[in-house]
Image (cartoon, rainbow, N blue to C red):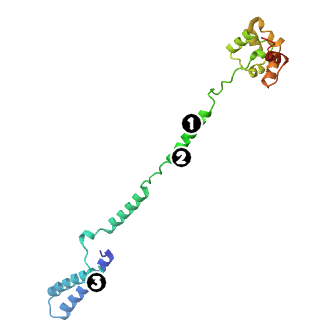
Amino acid sequence: MPTAEATRRAWISGAILGLLILISLWGIGDYSFLAGLFLGIVGAVITALVLIWMSLGGEGMDAAQWEPDALSGTGQAAARTLDVIEPQPSPKPAVQETAQEISDLKAKSASAPAKPAGKAEPDDLKLIKGVGPKLEELLHENGVTQFSQIAAWDDAQVDHFAELLGRMGGRIRSDDWVAQAQTLASGGETEFSARVEKGEVY
């Protein structure tokens, strides 16, 4: 399609030629004004159409091939926009790697100890001088199962457990359970604990 500028120039050129025809035929020749005007218009139209045809390179264009410049640009812009926003396919997960990770987790679970975390085996509190089987059972009932618990008792806790143990509560201070528990909790032994482990007591 010719551009608007080329079309405008073609019509201007045709009008100039038509005006020249009118002047030539009416002013110089023997034609009347109306005859000169008619021939000038015909010449102008023919000239403009020929120039427009030449701007097409001498070839006609099928109507099916024609599309307005504005719409063509819009279509191209829309196509580019769709290309930009079209979602890209996400990569498929590596199935073999996932299966390997699951297998590793199962292996770790199988090798883990069956004992629940935080459930340490109770210490043998009878290794503390003054704690017999009955007192050990009473301490267990009140949540005391480790040497480290007794080793951390302060005066208030000593008084509390002395009251719980009743007439035997005085043994906590007289036998110094806290000092014995500190030794046993650190992995050492006392004279009394050594006798118990040899089977001389209980």
Towards the viewer: 39 or 134: 134
Neighbor class of circle 1 (other Cα within 10 Å; few <14, some 14-19, many 20+) is few
The residue positioned farthest toward the front in the image shown: 199
Residue at position x 76%, y 19% in the image: 150
Q: CA distance from mark 2 to mark 1?
A: 14 Å
Q: Is residue 72 left or right of residue 37?
A: right
Amino acid type at image mark 2: Glu
Q: Is residue 183 above or below residue 35?
A: above
Image location of residue 45, percent across then percent down: 21, 81
Q: Is residue 48 above or below residue 139?
A: below
Examine the image and state in which quarter residue 9 appears. bottom left
Examine the image and state in which quarter residue 116 appears. top right
Q: Is residue 94 left or right of residue 155?
A: left
Q: Are marks 3 and 2 in contact (CB under 8 Å)?
A: no
Label located before the other in sequence (3 or 1):
3
Residue at position x 84%, y 11% in the image: 174
Label located before the other in sequence (2 or 1):
2
The residue positioned farthest toward the right in the image shown: 191
Towards the viewer: 22 or 39: 39
**Dot in front, 3 or 2:** 2
Image location of residue 19, percent across then percent down: 23, 86
- Reading the image, the residue beneath label 3 is 13
Dot 1: what SS? helix
Q: Quadrant of the C terminus?
A: top right
Towards the viewer: 64 or 139: 139
Q: Which mark is residue 106?
A: 1
Q: Is residue 25 above or below residue 119?
A: below
Q: Which mark is residue 97?
A: 2
Q: CA distance from mark 3 to mark 2?
A: 77 Å
Image location of residue 98, percent across then percent down: 52, 44
